[in-house]
Amino acid sequence: MTPRQCEIAAESYTACLLAQCGYDVLVQYGANQPHYDLMAVKDERKLPVSVKGSQDGGWMLAVRFVKPGVNYHAAIDQWLAIQRKDVVYVLVQFLNVALGQAPRVYVASPPEIADHMKTQCNGRGHGSLQEDYQLHHPRSQYSHKIPIKWVFTNERIDQIQP
């Protein structure tokens, strides 16, 4: 898929999952999306959802903030500072997913993501969030992976606090 097709597939699949969990889903299209892609509504609960799709095992979230003189922890803090306080992230991974098979999906709040990115690379931190670094880079010394509690379930999406 092209990067744009990956984005569309990820958003569509996320909308499907949210609908299966009983949420009404409002989809934003166009260039001006204010920090979220979908609005999920269930009873009184309203969740702005930022969807990130990937085909390479990771999501480049804080990479653009890493510059000379800015270490990974500071870059991650800068990324976190610009996030909406009420948004949740849905991370959709298509790497090694055959056509017609379901991608792997995770749900996390920006503070959870930032805290986890800081633990990557033995605590040095990393600008991209990696699903399972050792699996996708077998010769690497790093073994960080997404926490199992982030796996998309009805309970996870219903209980996550932005």
Image (cartoon, rainbow, N blue to C red):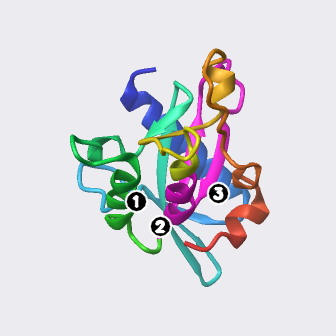
Q: Earlier in the sequence, mark 1 or mark 2?
A: 1
Q: Residues within 10 Å of mark 2 (few under 14, many from 20)?
A: many
Drawn side of residue 148 relative to residue 68, left or right: right
Q: Residue at x 52, y 34 (%)?
A: 58
| Residue occupying image coordinates x 59% and y 58% | 108
Percent position of residue 151, x then y: 72, 49
SS for callout 3: helix
**Residue kind at label 3, given as amino acid type:** Leu
**Is the residue 89 above or below the residue 8 in the image?**
below
Q: Is residue 101 magenta?
A: yes
Question: What's the amino acid at mark 2?
Answer: Val
| Residue 18 left/right relative to 67 | right
> Is residue 81 left or right of 158 when viewed as pictured?
left
The mark found on residue 137 in the picture is none
**Which residue is denoted by mark 1 in the rendering?**
36
How far apart marks 3 and 1 lie (CA) works out to 15 Å
Label 2: which secondary element:
loop
10 Å crowding of disc 3: few (<14), some (14-19), many (20+): many
Image quarter of the C terminus: bottom right
Nearest to the observer: residue 157 or residue 14:
157
- Residue bearing the label numbered 2: 87
Q: Nearer the viewer, mark 1 or mark 2?
A: 2
- Please tell me whether residue 43 belongs to the stretch shown in magenta: no
27 vs 150, left or right, is left
- The span shown in magenta is 87-116
* 89, 34: nearer the viewer: 89
Residue with the mark numbered 3:
18
Residue 47 screen position, x and y as percent = 53, 70
